[in-house]
Image (cartoon, rainbow, N blue to C red):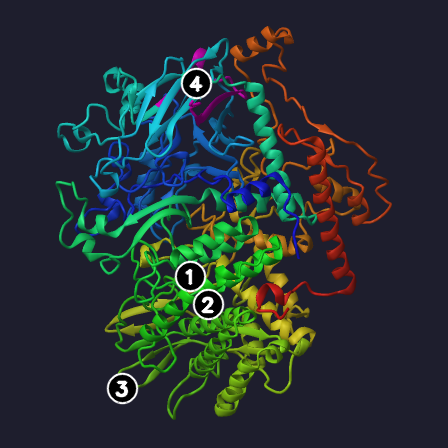
């Protein structure tokens, strides 16, 4: 089905896909933290946290990347933009977010700042970021002291706990970027600083432009390239940029309205070089160094900046300190622009027309609103739409340029006088000599995890496909390219240890992306699927050969992303001796086999050769399923415990004895993932596949009968079901999973059963006691850094896969299979209803309850729950407390936790919240404002509110014949310049949802290069899509049909 793709953002995405315009060249590709990363670690012992500290980062040049507040860069981070701040109380210039390192935090590394990713679109044509900057001195010392002295049994000490926000004495620093309507190389920046306190407060704002230092390492790539250069122009506030890749560009700054006069920026220049004098008490190689702006402004040392006003790092210093600073409740606005120099008139410096400038930002937010209305057209509640919008925004803001070239990193740069030690970081990653990373990647969290994690990326790609399938496909393919994937077939995990194993979810992710693109965007990229499949064959073979030590189809694998879930560290040799046979590893491999079977069947529609490969994966699944579930010989034990009715890990000792470890954890739920329905048409369409299937069923009939739900009786739609669990075992597992005294929380499925709260499992080995008990919050140990916990909390990725598994089982069993949900409630549900039930609980983590509390904020967090300048901003944490839903771990885990955006898309309309629409008129109010335009949904910081304009701009208006400056023209009051076509919306008691939507008026945007007729036509098409979506939903509601489609989950005959 072809999907309407006519919003302005969709057109830009199509232009970028077809390489007509490079809309994604510039984006949020700067890091939040580059210090203390493995890439920057040149120690002998691999202690990255101490080798490059936060304190060092102010003065020491980075080798592999850059960071900064509200960072923007090109796709190779050659030209970078960020902001710096000073409140006249801090001892240092605020240039980056602060946090404690791994050894300093009582639960590992933790950012100690408040910033929010409020809005973004896939082409980054509009971006919005909010930073909370206190008036008082930032409490660096207090944060370190409290963090280092607290035990692992205590909560983390956060910035709000210092009381620094108690009296609202802080600035809201709102950063926005808007690209030109037609030219993706023209970037417009706007910074608005709001004083939330009740007293005037000074603020210094320094928009910065600088080059990543690529010239100081004597690499082959830079050998014949001229050094980039920044130079002040004759115009008062203009910087000329010259770079070998981008040619000549210009950054122009407009004056900003102060209290009684304009604040003109002062341009400062230095070089992005290390201050060796400050760090090492050695003479500087360069006179002007990285931390010069700090010394110039705070230390008042004028000698530190280049008097020739040139260098490789520059800023525009705006000082708002007149009469004590920005008045209480007031704001200031800074505008600047980056654009290519006109070759025909290089000396022409464009003035910034502040009115047109502000209208561009309003237009871009209009376009973003329409784009996201198209993505989710059903009338979900405003709160859900807000959560979904910020989830997408965080996902897009979490893109970062990532460079890691193993040869240069391990052996040292060619021109470096000091080579890395011979045992370089304890030989970390020494087997990955082919690795060459040099692209924009989707990061788990740009502060806590500013590096890729391969299985995280696979989950990122699901919500990414909803809004930008090209980028999602690119992310999957990157990890399967020959400069990432090892020659032996392994895929790198993450930079702390590329050798560590993450669950094998690339096949699932690739197939999901393929199917989701077809469903939501009307495109079927089978070439992508085929390219990925060939590389995955190598990876699958590596798993089979490397992680099945006895060749018995029961797999090991290590921690597999679940950190501390086991009683022992699963990444190290067992203290008991023997090997650990893992229910989750074996379950993952069965799941992997079925996903490869799925892909092979899909490809076989066009190329019959894949029929043969499909049957091979069918056989793999049968053998794995049987080995995991049934005894292979007399005296052996399977991983299924018949008395407990659950799957467990097992220690297999050298003498062959096998001991089950009865820990009720996700390890025993993961086998549910390995399920697949096969449409009956496939067996008719592909006689070769059916022949091999029949041969296997006949030759291994004993195995087949145990592991195929039914070889004679078909399920709903005559489907065939392949699954690790039969009907009886499925019911037994679900009885525990849906028990609120075990796995089922009010906020999703726990990673460890609550049963172990009163019944911890322990084992004594060599006089040392090992124990697993239910911990709903943070970890009580330092295992894997102590910054994550899989012994009770709720994790989105594994919950997402459980939901999909239930939907697959429903496709086979239909309404004939029902379970009590929750256990003891008396409510009987089919498995599609159970899946939706779990989805609703996951969504409610982020939605205010009847007391206006978001569970993710914690009930005791009044600042985030009730403060009008905090309560609308959502943080997407790494994981969530198994009892309370409180957000834990990385606070900006906008990657896999952004899966909530997909859940809202799928079941948001049936998820009742305090703001859910009730009547046709209130449903209309979900879409349109009082002027008949699509509502803004990103945040209360509207881009359509006029910011204060400079006196210079107002004078220009007056000289152009617009009269004397007024409060309106100065931006003291909001100005609406939007135009609408009005029509009667009808009586709220008449008609249904679809009738009313069909009468909604089209809107006319202010896009200057597209006619009103074209824009109105687009809006009409968008309304038609909304109407059709609601009609489809109403039809399903009337028929009582559960909204589960095999087309999104499985290979489907067409």
Q: Earlier in the sequence, mark 1 or mark 3?
A: 3
Kindly report the distance in space between the C-alpha atoms of the residues bearing marks 3 and 4: 83 Å
Q: Dot 4 lies on which element?
A: loop
Residue 779 picture quarter: bottom left
Residue shown at 14%/50% (left/top)?
421
The numbered mark at residue 345 is 4
Tell me the magenta residue range.
315-343
Kindly report the distance in space between the C-alpha atoms of the residues bearing marks 2 and 3: 28 Å
Residue shown at 67%/76% (left/top)?
716
Q: Position of residue 552 (x, y in %)?
A: 36, 82
The numbered mark at residue 709 is none
Question: From what the image shows, is residue 726 above or below residue 130?
Answer: below
The answer to whether the residue labelled 4 contacts the one labelled 2, judged by CB atoms less than 8 Å apart, is: no
Looking at this view, is 391 or 615 the one in front? 615
The answer to whether the residue labelled 2 contacts the one labelled 3, judged by CB atoms less than 8 Å apart, is: no
Answer whether residue 365 is magenta in the image: no
Kindly report the distance in space between the C-alpha atoms of the residues bearing marks 1 and 4: 62 Å
Tell how many labels.
Answer: 4
The answer to whether the residue labelled 1 contacts the one labelled 4, judged by CB atoms less than 8 Å apart, is: no
- Residue that badge 1 annotates: 790
Q: In the image, is 715 to the left or to the right of 103? A: right
Which is more foreground, mark 4 or mark 2? 4
Q: Quadrant of the C terminus?
A: bottom right
- Residue that badge 3 annotates: 655
Which is more foreground, mark 1 or mark 4? 4
The numbered mark at residue 666 is 2
Residue 503 picture quarter: bottom left
Q: Position of residue 1031 (x, y in %)?
A: 76, 54
The answer to whether the residue labelled 1 contacts the one labelled 2, judged by CB atoms less than 8 Å apart, is: yes
């Amino acid at each position: 089905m072809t999907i309407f793709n006519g919003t302005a953002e969709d057109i830009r995405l199509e232009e970028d896909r077809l390489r007509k315009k490079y809309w994604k060249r510039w984006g949020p590709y700067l890091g939040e933290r580059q210090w203390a990363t493995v890439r920057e670690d040149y120690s002998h012992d691999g202690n990255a946290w101490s080798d490059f500290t936060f304190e060092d980062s102010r003065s020491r040049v980075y080798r592999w990347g850059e960071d900064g507040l509200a960072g923007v860069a090109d796709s190779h981070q050659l030209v970078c933009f960020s902001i710096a701040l000073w409140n006249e109380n801090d001892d240092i210039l605020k240039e980056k977010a602060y946090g404690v390192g791994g050894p300093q935090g009582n639960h590992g590394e933790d950012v100690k700042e408040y910033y929010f990713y409020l809005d973004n679109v896939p082409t980054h044509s509009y971006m919005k970021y909010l930073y909370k900057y206190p008036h008082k001195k930032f409490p660096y010392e207090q944060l370190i002291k409290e963090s280092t002295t607290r035990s692992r049994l205590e909560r983390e000490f956060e910035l709000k706990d210092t009381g620094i926000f108690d009296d609202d004495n802080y600035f809201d620093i709102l950063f926005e970027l808007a690209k030109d309507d037609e030219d993706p190389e023209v970037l417009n920046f706007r910074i608005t600083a709001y004083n939330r306190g009740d007293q005037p407060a000074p603020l210094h704002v320094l928009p910065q432009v600088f080059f990543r230092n690529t010239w100081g390492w004597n690499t082959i790539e830079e050998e014949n390239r001229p050094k980039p250069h920044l130079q002040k122009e004759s115009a008062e506030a203009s910087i000329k940029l010259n770079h070998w890749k981008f040619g000549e560009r210009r950054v122009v700054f407009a004056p900003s309205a102060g209290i009684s006069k304009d604040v003109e920026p002062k341009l400062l220049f230095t070089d992005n070089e290390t201050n060796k004098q400050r760090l090492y008490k050695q003479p500087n190689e360069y006179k002007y160094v990285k931390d010069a702006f700090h010394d110039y402004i705070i230390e008042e040392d004028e000698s530190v900046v280049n008097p020739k006003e040139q260098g490789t790092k520059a800023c525009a210093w705006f000082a708002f300190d007149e009469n004590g600073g920005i008045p209480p409740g007031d704001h200031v606005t800074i505008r600047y622009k980056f654009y290519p120099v006109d070759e025909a008139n290089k000396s022409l410096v464009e003035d910034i027309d502040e009115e047109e400038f502000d209208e561009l930002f309003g237009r871009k937010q209009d376009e973003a609103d329409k784009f996201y209305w198209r993505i989710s057209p059903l009338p979900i509640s405003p709160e859900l739409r807000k959560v979904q919008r910020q989830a997408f925004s965080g996902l897009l803001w979490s893109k970062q340029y990532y460079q890691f070239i193993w040869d240069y990193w391990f052996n040292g740069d060619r021109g470096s006088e000091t080579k890395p030690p011979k045992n370089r970081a304890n030989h970390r990653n020494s087997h990955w000599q082919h690795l060459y990373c040099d692209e924009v990647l989707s990061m788990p969290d740009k502060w806590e995890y500013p590096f890729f994690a391969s299985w995280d990326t696979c989950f990122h790609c699901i919500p990414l496909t909803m809004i930008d399938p090209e980028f999602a496909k690119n992310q999957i393919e990157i990890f399967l390219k020959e400069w990432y994937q090892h020659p032996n077939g392994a895929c790198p995990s993450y930079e702390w240890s590329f050798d560590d194993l993450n669950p094998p979810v690339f096949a699932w992710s690739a197939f999901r992306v393929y199917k989701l693109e077809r469903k939501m965007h009307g495109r079927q990229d089978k070439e992508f699927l085929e390219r990925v499949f060939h590389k995955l064959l190598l990876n699958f073979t590596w798993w089979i050969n490397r992680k099945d030590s006895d060749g018995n189809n029961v797999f090991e694998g290590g921690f597999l992303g679940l950190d501390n879930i086991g009683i022992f560290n699963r990444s190290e040799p067992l203290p008991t001796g023997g090997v650990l046979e893992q229910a989750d590893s074996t379950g993952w491999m069965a799941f992997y086999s079925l996903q490869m079977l799925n892909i092979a069947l899909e490809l076989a529609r066009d190329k019959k050769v894949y029929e043969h490969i499909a049957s091979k994966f069918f056989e793999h699944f049968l053998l794995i399923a049987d080995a995991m579930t049934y005894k292979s010989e007399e005296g052996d034990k399977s991983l299924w415990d018949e008395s407990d009715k659950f799957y467990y890990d097992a220690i297999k000792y050298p003498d062959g004895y096998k001991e089950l470890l009865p820990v009720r954890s996700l390890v025993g739920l993961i086998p549910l993932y390995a399920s697949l329905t096969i449409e009956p048409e496939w067996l008719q369409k592909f006689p070769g596949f059916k022949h091999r299937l029949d041969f296997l069923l006949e030759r291994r009939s004993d195995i087949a009968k145990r592991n195929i739900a039914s070889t004679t009786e078909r399920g709903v739609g005559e489907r065939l079901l392949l699954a690790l669990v039969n009907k009886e075992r499925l019911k037994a597992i679900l009885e525990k999973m849906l028990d609120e005294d075990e796995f089922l929380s009010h906020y999703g499925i726990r990673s460890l059963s609550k049963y172990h709260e009163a019944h911890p499992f322990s084992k004594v080995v060599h006089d040392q006691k090992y124990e697993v008990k239910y911990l709903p919050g943070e970890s009580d140990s330092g295992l894997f850094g102590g910054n994550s916990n899989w012994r009770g909390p709720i994790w989105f990725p594994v919950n997402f896969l459980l939901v999909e598994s239930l939907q697959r089982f429903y496709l086979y069993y239909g309404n004939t299979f029902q379970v009590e949900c929750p256990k003891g409630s008396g409510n009987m549900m089919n498995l599609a209803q159970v899946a939706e039930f779990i989805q609703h609980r996951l969504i409610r983590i982020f939605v205010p309850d009847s007391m206006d509390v978001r569970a993710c904020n914690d009930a005791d967090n009044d600042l985030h729950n009730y403060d009008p300048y905090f309560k609308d901003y959502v943080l997407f944490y790494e994981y969530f407390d198994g009892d309370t839903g409180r957000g834990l771990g990385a606070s900006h885990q906008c990657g896999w936790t952004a899966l909530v955006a997909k859940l809202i898309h799928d079941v948001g309309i049936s998820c009742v919240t305090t703001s859910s629409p009730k009547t046709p008129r209130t449903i209309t109010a979900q879409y349109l404002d009082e002027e008949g335009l699509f509502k803004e949904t990103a945040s209360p910081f509207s881009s359509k509110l006029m910011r204060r304009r400079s006196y210079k701009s107002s004078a220009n208006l007056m000289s152009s014949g617009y009269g004397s400056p007024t409060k309106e023209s100065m931006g003291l009051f909001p100005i609406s310049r939007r135009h609408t076509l009005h029509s009667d919306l009808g009586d709220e008691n008449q008609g249904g949802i679809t009738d009313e939507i069909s009468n909604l008026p089209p809107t006319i945007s202010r896009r200057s290069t597209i006619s009103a007729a074209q824009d109105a036509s687009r809006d009409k098409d968008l309304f038609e899509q909304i109407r059709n979506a609601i009609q489809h939903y109403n039809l399903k509601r009337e028929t009582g049909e559960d909204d589960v489609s095999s087309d999104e989950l499985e290979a489907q005959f067409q």
